[in-house]
Image (cartoon, helix red, strand yellow):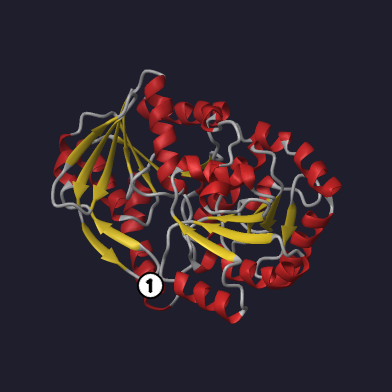
Amino acid sequence: MKITLVTHSMYPDSIGGRERYVYYLADALGKKGHQVKVFTCTNSFHSKVKKYRNFTVYYFPSIDIPLKSALYRIPFAMVPRLLKDDSEIIHAQDMHHFTTFVSSVSARAKNKSFIVTEHGYPPMEGLMKLLIKVYDRTLLKFIEKISFKIIGVSNFISTELEERYKINGNKITTVHNAIPANYFVKNNFEFREKYSLKDKRIILGVGRLTKEKGFQYLIMAFKKISKKFPSAVLVLIGPYRSYKNALDRSVKRLRLTGKVIFTGPLGDDIVKSAISCCEMVVIPSLYEPFPFVPFEALRYGKPVIASATGGLSEIFVHGINGLLVKPGDYKDLEQKIELLLSDKKMRTALIQNSDDVLQRFNWRSFLHKMENIYEKTSV
């Protein structure tokens, strides 16, 4: 099949769950013999093409609108190319990006099959909340009408599509995220060496530094942890956003300077190294659709503490394969972190029980489900 994936931004130029999802999917489909293209945006004034072994990425100039909560892109240069595209299926990412809207218009104009994967969109406040409401009643309804299927990356997202956005349930299907098995490599200690963390007990958080990721509560929880466990250090890996300033203020107010490390965005290899070196991975999110981070942690034999919210509750059973905490409760986080730092038997038991998670959300099953959807779409 000829398949075109459309995304607002693309890995490795941009680091995030959606971007990696597209990269992994494009590569796997290409390996199986499908002809795969990826259309995405660039802040350059010129279009460019990047060829990988199994797929090709086309970058198109866009008008970028940087807002406090997110970056929005109007992909004006992508539209003519979409109208000339020879693919049988257009598969767009996220319903609230203009790349998805222009893709749906192009699919309608050329009578092509159209699919959307929804990766999750946290509730907004103020003016953004009003603008999203207008979008939902206009552009989103058109996207829904054109779509053959709308894929939720978790049951949580599929439910949200139906209840929050009033999408027709017959169009919604869940295909849980997964990571290719060849993504993982042998443990290494490059991260410890780079950040001079030899003999430190690393508590690790990975994700964009935004309010909904909940790192503010992790920093608050770390205040007492740093006193009880002097060798502990909190490391937060992820792209900076405007909320980074608030996190910096918290670190200074709690007198944690030097004990909390913000690395900014890092390449895959060094992130893998950080996970392989850490004591535990903490995911304190207030809103979380279905992240890749838990699978990375479990593959490297690391225990996970996660908020009991969104797709995370579909991955972990408290006390069996992970520890769940109440979202936004820093005291609960503090207690669970202390438990894992103190109790080696608990850490070992959680990891021993993690195989079920990796079996349930495996790459082969994910790819099989996606190909089935494509096949039904192209009939």
Q: As drawn, is 188 to the left or to the right of 16?
A: right
Q: Which quadrant: the N terminus?
A: top left
- x, y (%) of residue 89? 32, 32
The residue at the point 74 percent across, 60 percent down is 337
Q: x%, y% of residue 227?
A: 74, 71
- Tag 1, which secondary structure? helix
305 relative to 142 in the view: left or right: right
Judging depth in this view, the residue of 241 and 2 nearest the camera is 241
Crowdedness near tag 1: few (<14), some (14–19) or many (≥20) residues, C-alpha within 10 Å: some
2 in relation to 352, above or below:
above
Q: Which residue is disc 1 drawn over?
A: 128
Residue 133 lies, with reference to residue 153, above or below; the image says: below
Q: Residue at x 48, y 26 (%)?
A: 372
Q: Residue 180 at what x, y percent from top left?
A: 52, 31
Task: Please tell me how many numbered marks the rendered image carries.
Answer: 1
218 left or right of 111 in image: right
Residue placed most toward the observer, 22 or 172 = 22
In the foreground, 27 or 196: 196
User: Whole-percent x and y of residue 326?
Assistant: 71, 65
